[in-house]
Image (spheres, rainbow, N blue to C red):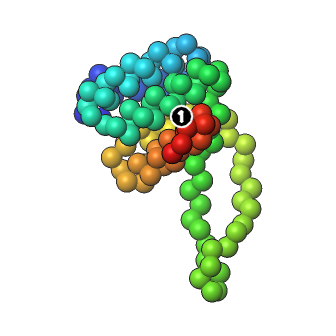
């Protein structure tokens, strides 16, 4: 994000989230304002993830999307993908939302962009939208 106002608003959202947790009406209004700013900057991925996020929080009074799995797939001797159940720690919605917001701050990084797309996919699946 090039827009200083958008960067400051994203920082405010992150600070409020760390201090107070997910306060639905505040975070939804801030995300709606942030979306307007990223639309002005013509960043479609951020506009989409922001809209889906505030709609999800508004509907659920929480952020119920897990952090995308970043474990690389392992191949067996034949080059086939191994299916392995990986134990993950319980991650709260707040932690996942904090992580997603940190990805948004550096959205031009290719890995961050891929993870933001995973959030979009998960949010759309949760909302029942086709991806």
Depth order, front residue of 19/88: 88
Residue 73 shown left or right of residue 43 in the figure: right
Label tally: 1
- Residue at position x 59%, y 82% from top? 79
Q: Disc 1 on helix, strand or loop?
A: helix
Q: Position of residue 121 (x, y in %)?
A: 53, 45
- Residue at position x 50%, y 31% from top? 52
- Classify residue 91 by image quadrant: top right
Looking at the image, which residue sits at the far bottom? Answer: 78
Q: Position of residue 54 (x, y in %)?
A: 51, 24
Residue 29 shown left or right of residue 69 in the figure: left
- Residue at position x 59%, y 17% from top? 23
Q: Position of residue 7 (x, y in %)?
A: 33, 28
Which quadrant holds the N terminus? top left
Residue designated by label 1: 98
Q: Position of residue 27 (x, y in %)?
A: 51, 19
Residue 108 shown left or right of residue 116 in the figure: left
């Amino acid at each position: 994000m090039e827009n200083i106002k958008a960067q400051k608003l994203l920082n405010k959202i992150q600070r409020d989230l760390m201090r107070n947790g997910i306060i639905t009406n505040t975070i939804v209004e801030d995300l709606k304002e942030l979306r307007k700013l990223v639309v002005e900057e013509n960043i479609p991925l951020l506009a989409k993830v922001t809209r889906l996020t505030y709609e999800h929080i508004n509907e659920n009074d929480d952020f119920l999307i897990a952090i995308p799995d970043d474990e690389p797939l392992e191949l067996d001797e034949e080059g086939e993908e191994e299916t392995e159940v990986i134990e993950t720690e319980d991650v709260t919605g707040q932690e996942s939302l904090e992580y997603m917001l940190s990805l948004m701050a550096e959205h031009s990084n290719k890995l961050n962009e891929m993870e933001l797309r995973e959030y979009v996919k998960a949010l759309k699946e949760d909302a029942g939208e086709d991806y």
